[in-house]
Image (cartoon, rainbow, N blue to C red):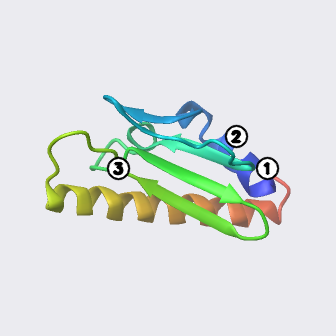
């Protein structure tokens, strides 16, 4: 839970309660111990996925979410998912390092 608290503290302006874009929604019913970040809020200098979900129980699960309602351009989706994955790994590494120093 310390990692989730760190993510919430360090990225509080990007924390959202649901994944929803223009009529598309990813339902998160039943999930516990998770935090959702809005991609465009945490990354302004390149294309990124719509949402990044961090879920922690005995293991860490990261969901990289790009919602599409109509048109999908494979190259753009690949770029957004790749950038989202890199950002998620950076956030997780940052908060895992902080865990040992009790900063979060």
Distance between mark 1 and mark 2 Cα atoms: 7 Å
Q: Are marks 1 and 2 in contact (CB under 8 Å)?
A: yes
Instruction: Say which residue label 2 marks.
Output: 9
Q: What is the x, y in percent for residue 74? A: 16, 60
Query: Which of the 4 quarters of the picture holds residue 81?
Result: bottom left
Name above or below for residue 96 compared with residue 7: below
Query: Which of the 4 quarters of the picture holds residue 2?
Result: bottom right
Q: Earlier in the sequence, mark 3 or mark 1?
A: 3
Callout 1: SS: loop
Foreground: disc 3 or disc 1: 3
Instruction: Say which residue label 3 marks.
Output: 66
Callout 2: SS: helix
Residue shown at the point (15%, 62%) measured from the top left: 75
Residue shown at the point (18%, 40%) measured from the top left: 70
Q: Earlier in the sequence, mark 1 or mark 2?
A: 2
Name above or below for residue 90 compared with residue 31: below
Quadrant showing the N terminus? bottom right
Callout 3: SS: loop
Which circle marks residue 45 in the picture? none
Foreground: disc 3 or disc 2: 3
Q: Left or right of 89: which side holds 98? A: right
Q: What is the x, y in percent for residue 33? A: 75, 50
Q: Left or right of 44: which side holds 14? A: right
Crowd band around label 2 with a 10 angstrom C-alpha radius: few (<14), some (14–19), many (20+): few
Distance between mark 3 and mark 1 Cα atoms: 29 Å
Q: Left or right of 104: which side holds 22? A: left
Q: Are marks 3 and 1 in contact (CB under 8 Å)?
A: no
Residue shown at the point (71%, 66%) measured from the top left: 97
Instruction: Say which residue label 1 marks.
Output: 104
């Amino acid at each position: 839970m310390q990692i989730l608290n760190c993510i919430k503290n360090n990225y509080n302006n990007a924390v959202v309660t649901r994944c929803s874009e223009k009529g598309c929604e990813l339902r998160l019913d039943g999930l516990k111990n998770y935090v959702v970040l809005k991609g465009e809020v945490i990354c302004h200098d390149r294309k990124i996925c719509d949402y990044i979900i961090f879920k922690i129980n005995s293991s860490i699960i990261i969901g990289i979410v790009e919602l599409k309602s109509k048109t999908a351009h494979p190259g753009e989706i690949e770029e957004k998912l790749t950038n989202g994955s890199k950002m998620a790994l950076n956030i997780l590494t940052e908060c895992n390092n902080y865990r040992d120093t009790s900063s979060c």
